[in-house]
Amino acid sequence: PSASVENPPANKALNWTRTENLYDHKSKELFLQRYILALFYYSTNVPNKGGWQKCKQDQDCTADRKPFLSANVTECQWYGVYCHDDVVEELSFDNNNLHGNIPSELTHLTNLQRLFLGKNDLSGGIPTALGNMTHLKHLRLNDNILEGD
């Protein structure tokens, strides 16, 4: 995945990841995972449409989860992100006022088993590569404005 001038969410995600990089470039895989999650946030958190309802950046969260993009903790501690051995296996963001497109870069989370994005206002196409994710067993995209099969 690469950031470009034409993709403001990618630019924001890359800048945030470089600035708040917990891994100090020691693990390319973990750096990429953190970037993809930041890209997901910046692609689906549209402030002029109310932004995320739960645990967005700089917002209080539950006792066992940190707000998305919290620095100095792994992304596995962020709201909606569930991991095994520091590798993302589930993203759970049903009914969270997500807007925008599902970034195709999510397909680079190769161990993702569960992706729950139902009851939001996501639009655009469903990334076709989601169908090629061999570990993805549960996918919920209902009640959005998505195109595709």
Image (cartoon, grey):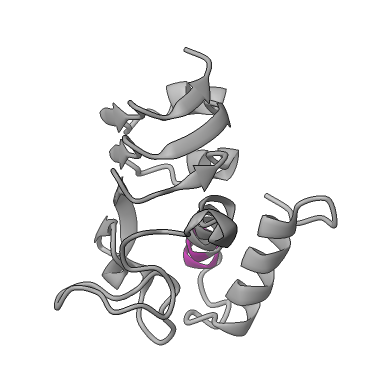
Give me the residue at 55% from left, 82% from top: 20
Main SS, magenta residues: helix
142 relative to 52 in the view: left or right: left
129 relative to 118 in the view: left or right: right
Relative height, residue 40 to residue 147 (above, below): below
Give me the residue at 31% from left, 29% from top: 139
Res 54 quadrant in image: bottom left
Residue sitting at the far right: 5
Res 60 quadrant in image: bottom left
Give me the residue at 81% from left, 55% from top: 4
| Most foreground residue, 147 or 138 | 147
| Most foreground residue, 7 or 33 | 7
* Residues in magenta, as a range: 30-34
Report if residue 105 lies within the magenta region: no
33 relative to 8 in the view: left or right: left
Report if residue 33 lies within the magenta region: yes
Relative height, residue 65 to residue 19 (above, below): above
Relative height, residue 77 to residue 113 (above, below): below
| Most foreground residue, 67 or 38 | 67
Q: Position of residue 16 (x, y in %)?
A: 61, 75
Q: Position of residue 105 (x, y in %)?
A: 57, 44
